[in-house]
Image (cartoon, helix red, strand yellow):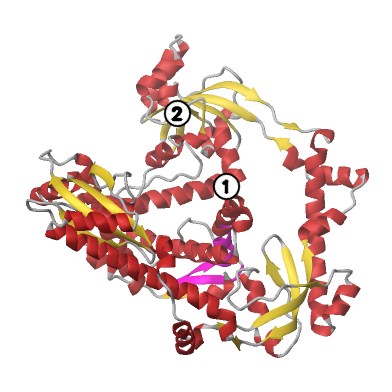
Amino acid sequence: MLSSIKDKTKGPITIAIVVLISLTFVITALYGIDFNSSGSVVANVDGEEISQKEFLSEFDPKKRQLQQDLAEKYTAEFDNMLKQSTLESMINRRLLDQLAENMGHATTAEELQTLIQSNNLFKVDGQFSIERYKKLLALNGYSDVKYESTKLAELTQGQIKYNLLDSAFVTPSALKNLQALNDQQREFSYIQLNADNYSDKVKVAAESVKDFYDNQKESFFEPQKLKVDFVELSLDQISKTIQVNDDELFNFYEDEKERFTTEEERQAQHILVDSEQQAKQIVAQLNKGADFAKLAAKHSQDTGSKDAGGDLGFFTLGVMTPEFEAKVFSMKAGEVSSPVKTEFGYHVIKLNAIQAGEIKPFESVRDDLTKLYQQTKAQKSLYDLTEQLTNLAYEVSLEEVADQMSLTLNTSDFFTQNSAQYEQKFVDAAFSDVVFNKGENSEPIELSGDKVVVLRVKEKLAQRQKSFDEVKGEINTHLTTLLAKTFVDNIAKQITELLTKGDNEAAQALMNKNQLQWNEIGWIKRDSDKADVVIVNKVFALPKPNSSTTYSAQSLDKRQSVVIALSKVKTSNEAPSSALKNSLLNFESDEMFKSILTTLRKNADLEIFTERL
């Protein structure tokens, strides 16, 4: 019953996946929407374009969410990573959509409806709410048409993976062995050594520090740096300068009334059946006083509403199929319709309530209206000022630009070409040929937060070799850590050798000398949190001990080492669990799915224009 859902007939898989992958794909639009009407192209998939507009419609909501989550931690690096992952995902979906079409996969309207109405985000008091559905979509920049088309494509593509899962298998013997390994338990204890605790036990010779510097001079360069002057246009700052008077605000209110108008909503129940004859029989029963909800629960084929007595909640025009809503919005409250035919079948409808639309009073929306007015005016002003900034930047100095446009001339800190201190676009512009080599003003650069800047080099610091005196402390610390790590590695090795020989007394003496002690862990499984996961993995990588305890010295990282005492291993004879089997099957199907994606990308004619992202 959601809008724009078209039923399709599921086709059988008659051609092997391997053959399909090798076909020349004729890509069709993923969402069934024309995205090619305007804007730059960011990618071309076998001749089909992904426009910048389409890319931004998917990228911008993700960016806003990530910026909200990370706040000031959101950097240009995150921005670039998100752009790449978003575009990769869009390309993959295009290729999978074509593969699904060639394999005859399709999703029915009922399947899509069930998916959407089962989403708890769209429920109020446990029931699917059309009003909440529409509001959440609007808040996230989706129309119901686009959202439903997207979900339809995802469900159809998902059938590829489900079919792979059906074809994946694992032998009983392999499953049994894996279950035994998974359930295996090990008893152990360990001694942990940290190089930081032994830095006073080692001493780095002065000549070693100098030799290291002489041999690694290329590692001690300070890269070239820039300091730039720049002027900035900011939507936020422009908005604060917009003055609002009541007359202008009221005129704006009159022009934008639709934004503050609630649409008429109607609440209805329905019973969906296959034939007109059955629908007429239901109408006859209702006319005799039968309970609508009970008949819906018994006869309706709409799985999303039958358990709620056919209740569809409140909805506005443009939500349901045209024939259905035309009838609903022509009925009176309490009225039961004659059978209504749509693409889904025949509906018997009961209109329960009408909630008239209304225009919110001017005073009740003044604050929101003021913000919207300022933002609208600021957007136009930003566009005009950017045009002026562009013209001036090519004609006069940055000081004159700042003076003529009443902008502040800012100066950056020194930064390198790989700096994360400023947005990547800012850094790239500073080190561009025009700015860095020719000393000219940059073109206006659009930054996040609706900012536009023009910059110019103020000062350069050339790459330089750091002197020995500047880095000798750093080198000494580095070499001290290396020596201390070698020291603890040797202690761990000595303890292991003594214990393996059975000389427990000497091993204990060495431990006492270095203030070491055993950490008794006992029995653990692979997912245990009794010790660090790295240590647990080391324990389960050791061979099973024969009759006596196995001792092993292991390096954990650049600073830490351990001595592990593995005493016992035991396994379970329990039958393999369905969870493990499902995990293995999912893993196998995932790997096959990744392989298919890799092959699709390899065979496709792809052009990606990263500079347009």
**Magenta stretch: residue 403 in it?**
no
Q: Is residue 280 visible?
A: yes
The mark nearer the N terminus, 2 or 1, is 1
Q: Quick one: SS at disc 1?
A: loop
Name the amino acid, label 2: His
In the image, residue 348 above or below residue 597? above
Alpha carbon separation for disc pair 2 and 1: 25 Å
Q: Quadrant of residue 227?
A: bottom right
The image shows residue 577 at horizontal and vertical percentages of: 18, 40
Find residue 17 and name its label: none
Q: Quadrant of residue 305?
A: top left
The image shows residue 414 at horizontal and vertical percentages of: 69, 76
Q: Looking at the figure, which quarter contains the C terminus?
A: bottom right
Q: Name the residue that disc number 2 marks.
A: 347
* Foreground pick, 439 / 198: 198
Q: Quadrant of residue 108?
A: top left
In the image, residue 503 above or below residue 270? below
Find residue 143 and name its label: 1
* Foreground pick, 335 / 211: 211
Q: Residues within 10 Å of mark 1 (few under 14, many from 20)?
A: some
Give the residue at x 44% y 21%.
Answer: 309
Name the amino acid, label 1: Ser
The image shows residue 582 at horizontal and vertical percentages of: 23, 45
Q: Quick one: SS at disc 2?
A: strand
Give the residues drawn in magenta, as a range. Answer: 39-57
Contact (Cβ within 8 Å) of mark 2 with mark 1: no
